[in-house]
Amino acid sequence: MIQPAPTRRWDLLRLPLVRRFVRWRYSRFVLQLPLFLLALLALFDGFTGRQLAPKNLATVSVWLHYRGLVVLAIALLGNVFCAACPLMLTRGASRALKRWLPEWRWPRRLRNKYGVLGLTLLYLFAYEYWDLWASPWLTAWLILGYFGAALVVNAIFPSGTFCKYVCPLGNFNFALATASPTQITARDPARCLTCEGKYCVNGRGAAYPGCETRLFVPQIQSNTDCTLCLNCVRACPYDNVALEVRSPVREWVTARYRPDWALFGALLLFAGVMNAFAMVPPYYALAEALARALGTTHEGVLLGVIFAAWVGIAGLLSVGLSLLSSWLAGIHERPLQAVRRWGAGYLPMAFAVWGAHYAYHFLTGWASIVPVTQQALGRLGLYPGRPDWALAAQVPEALLFPTAALAIYAGLAASSYVLVRRSLALGRGYAALPVLALLVYLAALTLWVLAQPMEMRGTLLAPSPSGGI
C-alpha cells in the first residue's frame, strides 16, 4: 500500500553537499573503503599479532568499538554501518562467480526472520562459549568467515539475500534502527504512482542498481530491512526520495510489524539481558550450582542449558503475556498475531538494553583503538613511533552506570508510551499491563545486572571491585 503524502519534515538530502555526495555513483564505496581497510588490518593483526585481546586490533575494533559505534550511529543518524558495510565489496566477485554457478531462489519457507533469529542466537552462544572477545585469532576467523559467507550467498542467490535473510549483524541493526531518527520516504508518493520503471526497486541500468532488499520507497513504513545503502536515491530519475528526520516513536506506534519481526525484537531484548548477565558474578554462581546439580563441569553443557532455558522462558513470556494483553482488550487471536499486536513495545527496551551494554564496552576502551592501530601499522612499517598504551587506561568510570541507567529509563519510558497508545486505541487502557509489567521487570533486572562488578572484557582493566560498573 502506498503511503499518503506525509506532513513535510526536514529532509537531510536537501542539504546541498549531502545531496551531491549521496547521488554520486561512488559515494557508498567511499564509505566502505575505510572499513574494508580496517578489516584487512584487523585480519592481519588477528592472525599474526600478539594473541592478547586488549592489545590486538581484531578484538578491540570488533568487540569494543564496532558494537558501541553501531548503537551511537543508529541513535544519532541511522543504520550507517550497514550503508558502509565492507562485506558488500564482495559483490563484484559474486557477480563474476554467477557466470559459472547456478542462481537459486531463496526458499520460500525461509523468507522470514525465524532463520536469522536462530543464527543470531547461535552467534550469541558462540560468543560466550568460545570467548570470542578474548581471542584475536578466532575473531579474525569470524571476520574472514563473514566475508566468505557474503561472497558465497550472494553468488548463489539473488543480491540482497545475505543482508535480508542470513546476516545476524545486519538484522540486529535492522531491529535497532527502528530507534533511528531518520527514514527513507517518498517526497511525493503520487509521483511514484505514475513511475513505470519503479527504479527505486528495479534500478536504472547497471550503473544505478535498485534496492537489493526489494523495498518500494512509497510503501516503506519502517527501517526494518533497510540497509540505508541509498541505491534508491541514486536510481530515482525524479529525485523523489527523501531521508526524512522523524521521531522513532512514530514508527513504534504506527507500524504493524510482521510476527517474525515482532518475535525477533522480543527475543533480542531477552538476549541483551542474558548477554550482560553472563559477565557478572551471579552468572558464575548459577553455573556452579548447575554444575553440581548435573554432575558436569563441561562449559558447553552448562552454557547450553542456561541459554536454552532463558530463550525458552523468553519465548513463553513474550507470547503468553501478549496473548493475555489481547484477551484483556477483548481480542482472541493466535499467539503470533498477539505478539505482532504488542511486539512494537519490546523494541525501545531492546535498543536501550543493548545500547546500555554496548556503551559500557565502548566507554571502557574508547581510546584503546589508537595504540592497537599504531601497533598493527608499526608491524607493517607504516607507523614509526611507539604505541601509546596509556590511552587504553582512560576510562570515564563516573559515566558508566549513569549512562546505562539513563538509557534503560528512556527505553522503558518509550516502551510504556507505545504500549499505552496501542491499548488506548483498542479502548482498553489497562490491556497493556501484562506486557508492561514484564518490561518493568526486565528494566529492573538489567539495572541490577549493570550494578554488579562486571568483567571489563577486551580491556587491560580488571572488573570493578565493588558494586556498579
Image: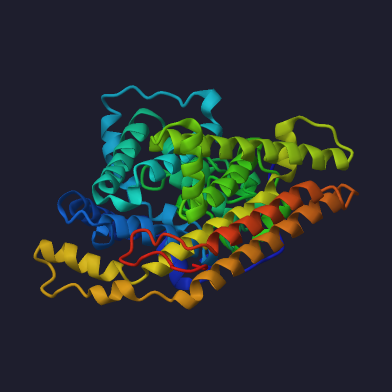
Asked whether residue 182 appears in the rendered view, the answer is no
Q: Where residue 33 sits: x, y (%)? A: 29, 57
Which residue is located at x 45 percent, y 52 percent? 229
Q: Where residue 85 sits: x, y (%)? A: 37, 52
Which quarter of the picture shows residue 301? top left
Q: In this view, does 441 lie above or below 75?
A: above
Q: Where residue 317 sits: x, y (%)? A: 69, 40
Classify residue 195 as left or right of residue 203. Answer: right
Foreground: 292 or 145? 292
Foreground: 318 or 155? 318
Classify residue 233 as left or right of residue 368. Answer: right
Which residue is located at x 78 percent, y 47 percent? 434
Which residue is located at x 68 percent, y 49 percent? 344
Classify residue 353 as left or right of residue 129. Answer: right
Q: Where residue 203 sits: x, y (%)? A: 46, 43
Asked whether residue 96 appears in the rendered view, the answer is yes
Question: Which quadrant does the N terminus fall into?
Answer: top right
Which quarter of the picture shows residue 11? bottom right
Q: How is the image coloured?
A: rainbow
Total marks placed: 0
Which residue is located at x 32 percent, y 74 percent? 393
Foreground: 242 or 39? 39
